[in-house]
Image (tube, helix red, strand yellow):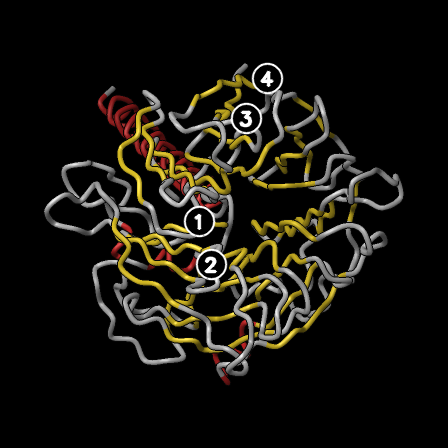
Amino acid sequence: MTCRKSYNIFTEGMILVDILVAMSLATLFVALFSARIFSTEQSFVRAHERMVILMASSSSMINLFSLNLTSPIFIPVSSSPACSTDFIQGFISPIITEIPLPISSTMPLTHLEVRDGIAFVSTDSNITSDPDLFVINISNSSIISSINTGPGISSFVLIGKKIFAAAASTAAQLHVIDFSGTTSPSIPFLSKKYQLPLPYATATPPYATAISFGFNGNYGGDWVSGDTNFSPPTSPQIYLGTERWDGDELAVIDVSNPEVPVWQSGLDIGSKVNDIEVDTSTSSLGGVYISNASQNQLIRADLGSIVATLELNITEKFSPTGWSRQEGKVSSILGGNLVFGRTSGGYDIATDHELFSWASTPPINPLISDVLNGPYNSKNIPGGVYGIIQDAKHIYLITRQAGKEFQVFDKTLATSSYFSLATQPQSVTCDGEIIYVLSHTSPIIYAISFTK
């Protein structure tokens, strides 16, 4: 009897141990699975993947999303917003909300960025006294602050506590707007104007038309907090595009010290630059992508050349049919997926497509540098493509096709959905789970979210 009782105790003990081991293994599996899911989601945390390495390594990213108006405005180091990994989450049922802006309807709006519910809207008014940048609280459509820089702003990027703006000016193409004032930190001030160097003394300077931001080489400093101890060629770069002129239409400007921009390199595009997408990753897509109005409507330039020689060289050109009447307008890179859009040229020719996608499944061979001339999918978009946002599964774009101003595609462009915004859109961005569209024809922002 005693032996049997001992045996039962031993058996029950072994069963208990087995249960504990099984529970431990289950816990470990769940933890590993959760970590894997989190890792996968983190790889798509932004709508553009310009600064993935920096975002992961920089200690200065902590608590930079605060927009407390009693302290300086903080914005992430990347020029890309932090957005959802999947806006739709399995359901395509958008809620579209109109947000009226307290801005004159006669004022041309050019670009939109949103951070933590705060909208930054640029304008290019022909009235000298009009502001060129508004900071607006989306929750109540109230103006927090504004600034008149003089000539108007074509586009801009938000970096730390600064805005770098492409100015519609021949006097100074790059404007640096600062939010780091101590007396009234919510009010921006113009801290620097920079003029591109002329190729010869009597050359006519251009207007700036596009702007982007990226780090050159392996970034190890804390640039947001004011650390300007950089040794070229490792430095923060502004990529500034211009109208066609006698100089280079793409300028690379070192902004290690934002108060003393230094021209570093240039690239002759031969046409107006409409958009610049910088991919600093080590993938096969790494480089600078320039959407422009030339025959080669999407140009890929080698970022590695800057690191080695402080020069930028064209490595690939993409020239789809219809280039003589259409312009390369915008590009987007996320998770190894490249998407390119162009205008319609004023009327639709069904065989001259406006949307192109180089899908990342299967992954592009990193040993093959020929990306733009590799396999891609394309789609006819009669209204042209004026802005692109991506998440892990979908492509979201704005067009000027009546009744289909907001469109959603899968990565291969095989499936699509269309929605009306009752406006001609100008610019698109995202913030968290919401996509924001700036109207071209009226002072309105459309907030788009998805639900079941």
Residue 332 x/y as whole percent: 59, 49
- Dot 2: what SS? loop
- Dot 3: what SS? loop
Q: Earlier in the sequence, mark 1 or mark 4?
A: 4
| Mark 2 and mark 1: Cα distance apart in space | 7 Å
Residue with the mark numbered 2: 169
For this orientation, the residue located farthest to the left is 183
The amino acid pointed to by label 4 is Ser
Q: Quadrant of residue 83?
A: top left
Of residues 109 and 234, which is closer to you in this image?
A: 109
Residue with the mark numbered 3: 89
Which disc, if any, is residue 152?
1
The amino acid pointed to by label 2 is Ser
Residue 78 x/y as whole percent: 39, 53
- Dot 1: what SS? loop
| Mark 3 and mark 2: Cα distance apart in space | 43 Å
| Mark 1 and mark 3: Cα distance apart in space | 39 Å
Residue 252 x/y as whole percent: 48, 71
Q: Is residue 204 above or below residue 78?
A: below
| Mark 1 and mark 4: Cα distance apart in space | 37 Å
Of residues 450 and 354, which is closer to you in this image?
A: 354
The amino acid pointed to by label 1 is Gly
Disc nearest the viewer among 2 and 4: 2
Residue at (30%, 23%) from the top-left corner?
8
Q: Is residue 176 above or below residue 34?
A: below
Disc nearest the viewer among 1 and 3: 1
Residue at (59%, 68%) from the top-left corner?
249
